Image: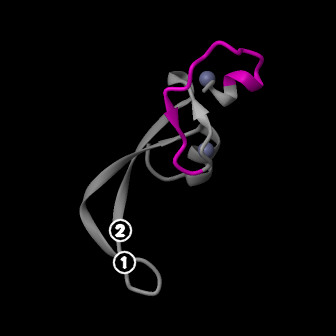
Amino acid sequence: MMCYICAKEGQFDSDAVAVCTICGMGTCMNHTIRKDIDVWEGGYPFPAKKLPKKMPRMFCPDCSAAFGKGK
Ligand SMILES: [Zn+2]
Ligand SMILES: [Zn+2]
């Protein structure tokens, strides 16, 4: 798989090293943003319980910007 963003910019030689957790696009090392996200247990309609550990997630720049919080 190629990096989607590099391919969009006309560079077709960057291999994707990660897949965005949200939109699923492949991103190269330069375009992958790693965030540590709080983990919540349970789902609708049950109340969520926050787990003590954070989970690393990989995001593309677009989803990272949309997600906002964290660094
Ligand atoms: Zn790239
Ligand atoms: Zn994304």
Judging by the rendered image, the residue that carries numbered circle 2 is: 40
Under mark 2, the amino acid is Trp
Q: Is residue 24 left or right of residue 35?
A: right
Q: Magenta stretch mostly in which secondary structure?
A: loop
Q: Quadrant of ligand 2?
A: top right
Range of residues picked out in magenta: 6-22
| Residue 54 horizontal/vertical position (percent) | 30, 54
Image marks 1 and 2: residues in contact by CB distance under 8 Å = yes
| Residue 35 horizontal/vertical position (percent) | 42, 44
Q: How many marks?
A: 2
Quadrant into which the C terminus falls: top left
N-terminal-most mark, 1 or 2: 2
Q: Tell me the element at label 2.
A: strand
Q: Is residue 38 above or below residue 63?
A: below
In which quarter of the view is residue 10 placed?
Answer: top right
Residue at 49%, 26% (x, y): give it: 17
| Residue 63 horizontal/vertical position (percent) | 60, 47
Under mark 1, the amino acid is Ala
Judging by the rendered image, the residue that carries numbered circle 1 is: 48
Q: Is residue 45 above or below residue 56?
A: below
